[in-house]
Amino acid sequence: MGAKSSSCFSRKGKSLTEYYTELEAIDSADFIRQAHNNDMIPYRCDKCGLWHLAPKNRQTPSRKCLSCTDAQGKPKELYFSRDDAQRRAEIILREQGVSLSVYECPENSGFHLTKH
Ligand SMILES: [Zn+2]
Ligand SMILES: [Zn+2]
């Protein structure tokens, strides 16, 4: 089982559990799903380089927009609902400190994030 991280904390200020391998994190996620009925997703932490678990609801369903591109000319993510886009914006704000706002795609049914 994982140990408590000394560098990474949850939003509530508790230390995150760290795992050395993805497999270990997946095993633990399976255990949590069975024991607590919580869906958790392993992700590799940019800060400590180890694995943590995050609630599945941080995953926001999206696809690439066929009409809109970002500043680098890549297709923008198109979120299925305003809530999904808003949730992604909150994650980006928390993790990267970048404030984004939600707007409706002018061409397709869905929502984008923009810095402006
Ligand atoms: Zn970490
Ligand atoms: Zn679009």
Image (spheres, helix red, strand yellow):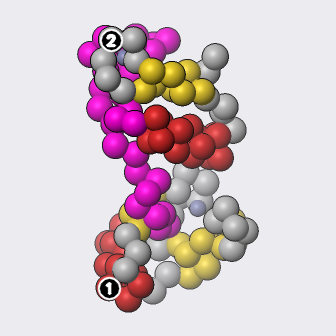
Where disc 2 sits, the SS reads loop
Location of the N terminus by quadrant is bottom left
The answer as to whether callout 2 falls within 8 Å of ligand 2 is yes
Q: Is residue 51 above or below residue 92?
A: below
Circle 2 or circle 1, nearest the eye: 2
Q: Residues within 10 Å of mark 1 (few under 14, many from 20)?
A: few
Judging depth in this view, the residue of 41 and 89 nearest the camera is 89
Q: Amino acid at mark 2?
A: Glu
Earlier in the chain: of badge 2 and badge 1, it is 1
Q: Residue tagged by mark 1?
A: 34
Q: Which residues are magenta?
A: 52-81
- Kindly indicate whether the residue at mark 1 contacts the one at mark 2 (C-beta within 8 angstroms): no
Residue 64 is covered by the magenta coloring: yes
Furthest residue toward right: 13
Q: Quadrant of ligand 1?
A: bottom right
Q: Is residue 5 above or below residue 49?
A: below
User: Residue drawn at (39%, 11%), measured in percent from left and top?
Assistant: 106
Numbered badge on residue 107 = 2
95 left or right, relative to 65? right
Q: Position of residue 24 (x, y in %)?
A: 37, 76
Q: Residues within 10 Å of mark 2 (few under 14, many from 20)?
A: few
Q: Position of residue 18 (x, y in %)?
A: 53, 73
Location of the C terminus by quadrant is top right
26 left or right, relative to 48? left
